[in-house]
Amino acid sequence: MLYAFGFERIGVVVSDLYFVDPDPEPGQESPERGVRLELRLLERGELKGDIYSARPIAIDRPLWRVDLLESVDSAPGSFDRTHHHPNFRGWNPGSRVFVKELSADPVHWLTGKLSDVTGLLEEIGLSPEEIAPTDPADLHAAVPQIMDAVGRLLDGVHAGELAVAPGDDPVSSARVSWL
């Protein structure tokens, strides 16, 4: 399932995720499940028809990612693999960064990050000129709706309805998600 929240130049996308890392770090060999949230740039395309046509919208370059993940071997809600990626090299995320506060209370930590978009953008090195002046306030106002979507996805993951394995056969690599 995918949720998208768009503002003038930035957007937030949220999806459930089932992931089997083909080259896992020691101690992280088992599959993971959870919710991924990304802060992205948005691009408006040119109209493809007349003035009444639908406008193409691109959910473009990733800026920041948080993965509210847990090992499929752990109890739902353990958040034992929860981390974030504070930077990207193009479309590829930097290394996983594990933060004690994020693992202890991921919803609270994420709410705080999204509520201070200006601080988050400073952390990731995005110039204020790359976004619209209204984006931080608009995103801040949408935090309750975004976190509601995160909560619904987490509920579905913990109930076994979302972020499920791609089939019955074991796989050495898998990524089942919009993101």
Image (spheres, rainbow, N blue to C red):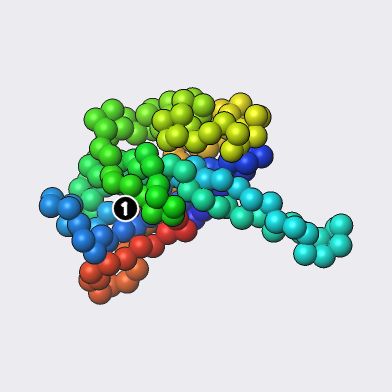
Q: Residue at x 61, y 26 (%)?
A: 137
- Which residue, as the protein is rendered here, is positioned at the far right? 51
- Please state the horizontal and vertical placement of residue 96, each as a whole percent of the image: 28, 44
Q: Residue at x 27, y 61 (%)?
A: 20
* Above-or-below relation of 61 to 141: below
Left or right of 79? Residue 136 is: right
- Please state the horizontal and vertical placement of residue 116, each as a whole percent of the image: 49, 25
* Above-or-below relation of 9 to 122: below
Is residue 50 in sight in this rendering? yes
Circle 1 Cα neighbour tier, 10 Å, few/some/many (<14 / 14–19 / ≥20): many
For the C terminus, the image quarter is bottom left
- Please state the horizontal and vertical placement of residue 85, each as a whole percent of the image: 35, 42
Q: Front-most of 79 and 155?
A: 79
- What residue is disc 1 on? 33
Q: Residue at x 39, y 62 (%)?
A: 176
Q: Dot 1 lies on which element?
A: strand
Q: Front-most of 100 and 2?
A: 100
Left or right of 31? Residue 53 is: right
- Which residue, as the protein is rendered here, is positioned at the far left? 26
Give the residue type at disc 1: Arg
Q: Residue at x 48, y 32 (%)?
A: 121
Q: Front-most of 85 and 147?
A: 85
* Above-or-below relation of 47 to 167: above
Q: For residue 112, what is the image quadrant?
A: top left
- Please state the horizontal and vertical placement of residue 53, each as a whole percent of the image: 81, 60
Is residue 142 in sight in this rendering? no
